[in-house]
């Protein structure tokens, strides 16, 4: 029986009216590269992704979503069936408290948008994890990258966290990436800079080595 892998990718969007949203510039390339590598290395892959301009790799089960809650709703049932979760999506951390039913007119510029946090999908899934599942998060940081990454590894009860710098010239929208893979038992491995395809192959290989 093949092992199942759930990978999330790309940004999510949160709307304050039917046509306007906040999000981030994630291209989805890293998550899609991971899906491609995992598929090639023999995993059955579910790829849950936000709005991106690229096509899912052939042979993976792709699921397109828009908001954080939609991503969570699709990931929930897939997570209970998977052996490995790689949460690479750049989930938008906040959403407008109110979503206007109709388009906000430009004459309404006095309007103030208040935000509330979105669900932490990884933390929610991790709270329901089976011990034999492997959970991998990504930590996008602008400074003190590895220290913050290690804190996220613990706070979200993960096995591995991929730390990458999103400082100027870092991972977002880029074709290359440089990463550290930090493990629960204190492991610390580094790779790159190299293409996202090469980084993806390396990450999947390292994770598959796990007992
Ligand atoms: N994540 C998630 N749901 C969210 C936010 C983040 O599942 N609402 C996941 C990301 O996919 C990633 C990990 O949590 O695997 C860490 O994301 P990151 O943005 O680095 O950290 P946050 O916990 O969101 O904290 P902050 O952005 O404030 O640094
Ligand atoms: Ca975040």
Image (cartoon, grey):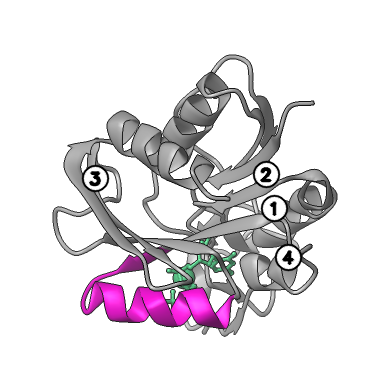
The mark found on residue 177 in the picture is 3
Which residue lies under the disc numbered 1?
Answer: 71
Question: CB under 8 Å between callouts 1 and 2?
Answer: yes
Q: Is residue 180 left or right of residue 119?
A: left
Q: Characterize the magenta stretch by its predominant secondary structure.
A: helix
Question: CB under 8 Å between callouts 3 and 1?
Answer: no
What's the CA distance linking mark 3 and mark 2?
Answer: 25 Å
What's the CA distance linking mark 1 and mark 4?
Answer: 12 Å
Circle nearer the N terminus (3, 2): 2
Of circles 1 and 4, the one toward us is: 4
The mark found on residue 65 in the picture is 2
> Would you place residue 133 above or below residue 78 in this image?
below
What's the CA distance linking mark 3 and mark 4?
Answer: 27 Å
Q: Residues within 10 Å of mark 3 (few under 14, many from 20)?
A: many
Question: Residue 187, position in %: x, y?
Answer: 36, 66
Q: Secondary structure at mark 3?
A: strand
Q: Secondary structure at mark 4?
A: helix
Q: Quadrant of residue 15?
A: bottom right
Q: Is residue 195 left or right of residue 158?
A: left
Residue extent of the magenta highlight? 139-156
- Residue that lies at the very extreme toward the top in this rendered image: 58
Residue drawn 47% across the image and 59% down it: 23
Circle nearer the N terminus (3, 1): 1
What's the CA distance linking mark 2 and mark 4?
Answer: 17 Å
What's the CA distance linking mark 3 and mark 1?
Answer: 25 Å
Q: Is residue 24 left or right of residue 62?
A: left
Which residue lies under the disc numbered 4?
Answer: 125
Q: Residues within 10 Å of mark 2 (few under 14, many from 20)?
A: many
Q: Is mark 4 within 8 Å of ligand 1?
A: yes
């Amino acid at each position: 029986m093949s092992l199942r892998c759930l990978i999330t990718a790309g940004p999510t969007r949160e709307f304050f009216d039917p046509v306007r949203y906040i999000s981030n510039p994630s291209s989805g390339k890293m998550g899609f590269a991971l899906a491609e590598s995992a598929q090639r290395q023999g995993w059955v892959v579910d790829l849950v992704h936000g709005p991106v301009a690229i096509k899912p790799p052939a042979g993976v089960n792709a699921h397109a979503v828009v908001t954080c809650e939609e991503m969570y709703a699709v990931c929930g049932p897939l997570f209970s069936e998977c052996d490995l979760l790689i949460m690479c999506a750049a989930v938008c951390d906040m959403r407008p408290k109110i979503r206007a039913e109709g388009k906000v007119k430009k004459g309404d510029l006095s309007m103030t948008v208040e935000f509330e946090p979105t669900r932490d999908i990884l933390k929610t899934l991790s709270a329901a994890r089976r011990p034999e599942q492997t959970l991998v998060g990504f930590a996008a940081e602008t400074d003190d990258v590895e220290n913050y990454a290690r804190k996220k590894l613990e706070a979200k009860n993960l096995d591995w966290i991929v730390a990458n710098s999103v400082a100027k010239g870092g991972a977002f929208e880029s074709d290359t990436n440089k990463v550290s893979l930090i493990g629960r038992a204190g492991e610390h491995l580094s790779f790159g800079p190299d293409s996202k395809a090469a980084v993806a192959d390396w990450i999947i290989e390292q994770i598959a080595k796990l007992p």
